[in-house]
Image: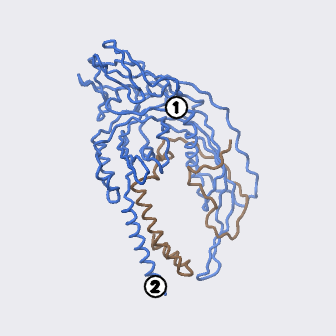
């Protein structure tokens, strides 16, 4: 980014040119991200044929519990084009991120490849089940429009023990003013590994912002002593900025419940805070990555998420133009903004979060407090319920101390 | 910082009563600071800086439209150039 030269002084008032016209609405195309190697039902270890497969987080690999063979699904960027964000046009949607058809049942019936029995799985709650006859593990891998199977999954690499240690450290720094019941019931070993649904979006966009900026030209004081007052002279400018930019892997919640960031009624913001993930390392879907973990199903489509995407793109644009405003030492008041998304690519992903939750109910108000650990980077953030009596006591002590200093100063000045 | 604020207020104070509000303000500040440290209600993903962004050079215009003489205001009214998430009128 280059910094614009300072505005020319002395130029007279001029009509600010209107913002350029918008582009035509983009078209939508779908890219197939189905893992062709896997079906719904029995999916065997490529080495020994067992279906006892699960993730080994310390390696980020799938492991066969019989022969100990380890492997990983192919990275998603080996399957589809994920580069060239700067030249994106239209709306490209992964087949795992297409609109959810509310008429499609979340319950999937699979035929066991081992014995022929029919096994029912509720994909709202789990992505696999054990055949009750032959004990084979069956997994759901085919993308149907119910939001259950995403385009990709990013496996856990932070282990349960590491997550417990991070939660302990986080809560350990917040003991003195914590709610006493929370401390008494604190059991970080109960942390649960959850694959959360997200929309991971590449976007190629342009933005224009317009407003008013001021540059100080003179500062002077009138009066003296206690009556001294500072006055300012300033030049006023009409300021317009334009930026073309590309954003790679912007990550937005794919669940309406998690996207609600009202901190007065929930603590979803702490889960949002542990973003970003190294989504470039996401792999093709294999439900075995979820064995031993829980997951939440996506319920948000592209259309639902678009307003949040546009909001974040506008924020990014405003952030990008900040460096070109250095000469406006009295600040800039942005008054209008415009965004044009030339192209976007949408992929649904399950991203790994270690989640410790604590249900708190005080004064008739219930809230679930989360402490969340990013299952890849280990970044931790949380909400620890506070003891209001202790907090009030601390505030009262501090206020009394400050007031004592003030009274001493006033007494000395008389 | 507290000394600075005290100094400024002391200089501006005319009847001696203004300073007395510092105690309650300080208490409220401590409450808010501790509450935020525990509850982290002000935290969210800093996508503006934590996402991979490739931006072309910024273009635009700066046109002088007016002059202000003798204002007591030390900064522009409604300064929002650092409040990236505060939306303004959306132009289509």
Secondary structure beneath disc 1?
Answer: strand
Rendered location of residue A261, percent (x, y): 49, 46
User: Residue A45 vs residue A386: left or right?
Assistant: left
Return the residue nearer the eye: A67 or A123. Answer: A123
Q: Is residue A346 above or below residue A142?
A: below
User: Residue A13 vs residue A88: left or right?
Assistant: right
**Figure label count:** 2
Residue neighbourhood size for the residue with mark 1, other residues' Cα within 10 Å, grouped as few (<14), some (14–19), many (≥20): many
Subunit that carries the residue with mark 1: A
Return the residue nearer the eye: A200 or A169. Answer: A169
Quadrant housing residue A206: top right
Residue beneath disc 2: A411
Q: Residue at x 55, y 41 (%)?
A: A308
Looking at the image, the residue that sits furthest to the front is: A364
Return the residue nearer the eye: B27 or A4. Answer: B27
Label 1 vs 2, first from the N-terminus: 1
Mark 1–mark 2 CB contact (< 8 Å): no
What separation in Å lies between label 1 and label 2 (alpha carbons)?
A: 67 Å
Quadrant housing residue A374: top left
Specify the colour of chain A.
Answer: blue
Q: Residue at x 64, y 65 (%)?
A: A216
Looking at the image, the residue that sits furthest to the left is: A67
Secondary structure beneath disc 2?
Answer: helix
Subunit that carries the residue with mark 2: A
Q: Nearer the viewer, mark 1 or mark 2?
A: 2
Residue beneath disc 1: A346
Rendered location of residue A49, percent (x, y): 28, 17
Q: Residue at x 56, y 77 (%)?
A: B12
Specify the colour of chain B.
Answer: brown
Quadrant housing residue A213: bottom right
């Amino acid at each position: 980014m280059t910094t614009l030269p300072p505005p020319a002084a002395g130029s007279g008032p001029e009509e600010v040119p209107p913002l350029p016209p918008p582009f035509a609405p983009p078209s939508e195309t779908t890219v197939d991200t189905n893992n062709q190697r896997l079906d719904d039902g029995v999916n065997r270890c490529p080495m020994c044929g067992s279906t006892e497969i699960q993730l080994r987080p310390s390696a980020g690999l799938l492991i066969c519990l019989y022969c100990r063979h380890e492997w990983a699904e192919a990275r998603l960027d080996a399957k589809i084009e994920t580069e060239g964000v700067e030249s994106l046009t239209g709306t490209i949607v992964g087949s795992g991120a297409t609109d959810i058809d509310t008429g499609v049942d979340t319950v999937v019936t699979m035929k066991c490849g081992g014995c022929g029995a029919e096994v029912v799985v509720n994909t709202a709650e789990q992505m696999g089940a054990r055949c009750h006859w032959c004990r084979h593990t069956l997994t759901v891998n085919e993308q149907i429009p119910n939001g259950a199977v995403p385009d990709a999954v990013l496996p856990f690499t932070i282990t349960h023990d590491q997550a417990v240690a991070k939660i302990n450290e986080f809560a350990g720094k917040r003991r003195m003013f914590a709610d006493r019941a929370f401390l008494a019931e604190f059991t970080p070993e109960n942390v649960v590994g959850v694959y959360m649904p997200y929309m991971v979006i590449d976007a190629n966009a342009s933005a224009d912002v317009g407003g008013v900026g001021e540059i100080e030209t003179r500062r002077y004081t009138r009066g003296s002593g206690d009556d001294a007052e500072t006055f300012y002279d300033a030049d006023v400018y009409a300021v317009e900025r334009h930026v073309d930019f590309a954003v790679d892997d912007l990550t937005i919640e794919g669940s309406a419940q998690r996207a609600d960031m009202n901190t007065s009624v929930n603590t979803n913001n702490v889960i949002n805070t542990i973003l970003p993930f190294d989504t470039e390392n996401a792999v093709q879907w294999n439900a075995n990555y979820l064995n031993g973990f829980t997951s939440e199903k996506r319920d948000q489509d592209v259309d639902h998420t678009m307003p949040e995407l546009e909001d974040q793109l506008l924020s990014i644009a405003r952030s990008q133009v900040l460096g070109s405003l250095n000469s406006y030492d009295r600040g800039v008041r942005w008054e209008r903004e415009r965004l044009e998304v030339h192209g976007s690519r949408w992929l649904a992903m399950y991203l790994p979060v270690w989640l410790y939750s604590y249900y708190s109910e005080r004064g008739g108000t219930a809230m679930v407090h989360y402490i969340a650990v990013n299952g890849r980077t280990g970044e931790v953030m949380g909400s620890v319920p506070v003891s209001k009596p202790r907090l009030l006591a601390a505030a009262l002590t501090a206020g009394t101390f400050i007031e004592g200093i003030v009274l001493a100063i006033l007494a000395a000045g008389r | 910082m507290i000394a600075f604020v005290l100094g400024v207020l002391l200089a501006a104070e005319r009847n001696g009563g203004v300073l007395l509000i510092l105690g309650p303000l300080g208490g409220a500040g401590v409450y808010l600071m501790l509450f935020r440290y525990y509850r982290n209600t002000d935290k969210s993903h800093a996508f503006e800086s934590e996402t991979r962004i490739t931006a072309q050079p910024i273009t635009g215009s700066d046109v002088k439209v007016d002059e202000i003489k003798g204002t007591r205001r030390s900064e522009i009214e409604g300064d929002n150039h650092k409040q990236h998430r505060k939306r303004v009128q959306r132009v289509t």
